[in-house]
Amino acid sequence: MNKTFPILAGVGFLVSSLAQADTAGIEIGTYQWTPEYSGFIAVNNGTQTGTQLDIENDLGFTDEGHNIVWASVEHPVPFIPNVKFVSSDLEVAASSMLTRDIVFGGETYTSNEMITTQIDMSNLEYTLYYELLDNWINLDAGLTFRQYDGVVTLNTDPAGSNISESELLEFTLPLIYVKGRVDLPLTGFFIDGEINIISYDGDSISDTAFSVGYESDIGLGGKAGYRTFSMEVEESNFVSDLRFSGAYISVFFHF
C-alpha cells in the first residue's frame, strides 16, 4: 500500500505555507523494521464469534521487513503546532496447515486445510506537536492521528473448499505523542526515544522506539534502534491483541 505521495504532498504544502517565516526546519527519513510477531486476531460476523487465531502457531507468520517513511516540518510561528507525517507499510502474508476447525468472519475452515492469510495494517500518521525544549536536550509533545486503511483476509485452496473471507480495517485512532533526544556534546552522536500511546473505550495502543544515532554537520544522519508495537482493539467485527517488536536501521536528512 503506497502512502508516500500524501506525505510528500503534505510536506510541500507546509513548506510553501511557511515560506514567510524566519526559519523552517525540515526532516525526512526512512527505515527498515524487521519485527517478530505474536498475539492473536479474530473476525466475527455480528452473530457468530470468531476463533482466536494465534498469528504464529495457527497462521504461520514469521519475521518480515517493513518500510517506514516520515517527514516533519518545524517553524518559529508561535502557537501553531509543528507537523509530522509517517507512512508505515505493515502488510504481511503467510500460509499454514490448519490443525483444528476455526471460524473466521462467519465461515468455518476445517482441520487439515491449507490456508493463506493476509494482514494489512498499513497506516498513515498525522502528528501535531510543540517543541518544549530545544537545545542539547530536545523534547516534543503533541497528538497523533493514526489512520488505518487495510484488510485481513483468509483464503483456502481454490481447488479445495475455496473459501475466502475478508474484514476491512478502516478506522482512525488518536494517540498521545512524546519524543525526546539527548545530544552528546561535540560528537554528533545522540540518543532518542519516541512513544505514541492511548487507552480508551476498550482500545489500547502502545508504540515505542529507542535508538542511538549520529547526525553530521550537514544534517545527514543515521540511527539504529528497537521498536515495540502492541495493539489491543475491537473495531467493528475485528478483534486483536497483537505485538510486533524488533530492531530497525534508519537514515535521515535534516535541513
Image (tube, rainbow, N blue to C red):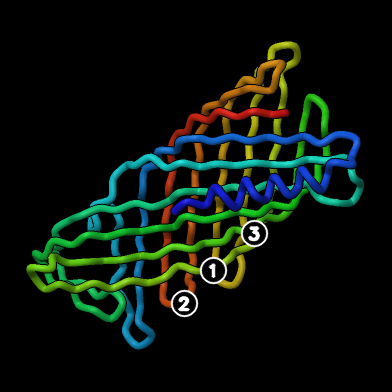
Q: Which residue is at 58% across, 66% downward? A: 172
> Is 230 left or right of 163, judged from the image as shown?
right
Density class for disc 2 (Cα within 10 Å; few <14, some 14-19, many ≥20) is: some
The C terminus lies in quadrant: top right
Element under disc 3: strand
Of callouts 2 and 1, the N-terminal one: 1
Distance between mark 2 and mark 1 Cα atoms: 9 Å
Residue tagged by mark 3?
145
Q: Which residue is mark 1?
A: 171
Could you tell me if the residues under marks 2 and 1 are in contact, i.e. CB atoms within 8 Å?
yes
Q: The residue tagged with tag 1: helix, strand or loop?
A: strand
Label 3 with label 2: CB-CB less than 8 Å:
no
Q: Residues within 10 Å of mark 1 (few under 14, many from 20)?
A: few
Residues at marks 3 and 2, CA–CA distance in whole angstroms: 19 Å
Residue 118 in picture, x, y percent from top left: 31, 59
Image coordinates for residue 209, horizontal then vertical, percent:
56, 39
Q: Nearer the viewer, residue 93 or 213?
A: 93
* Foreground label between 2 and 1: 1
Q: Among all residues in the image, which is located at the extreme bottom?
A: 47
| Badge 3 or badge 2: first in the primary sequence | 3
Q: Which mark is residue 216?
A: none
Q: Which residue is mark 2?
A: 236
- Which residue type carries mark 2? Ser
The three-letter code of the residue at mark 3 reads Phe
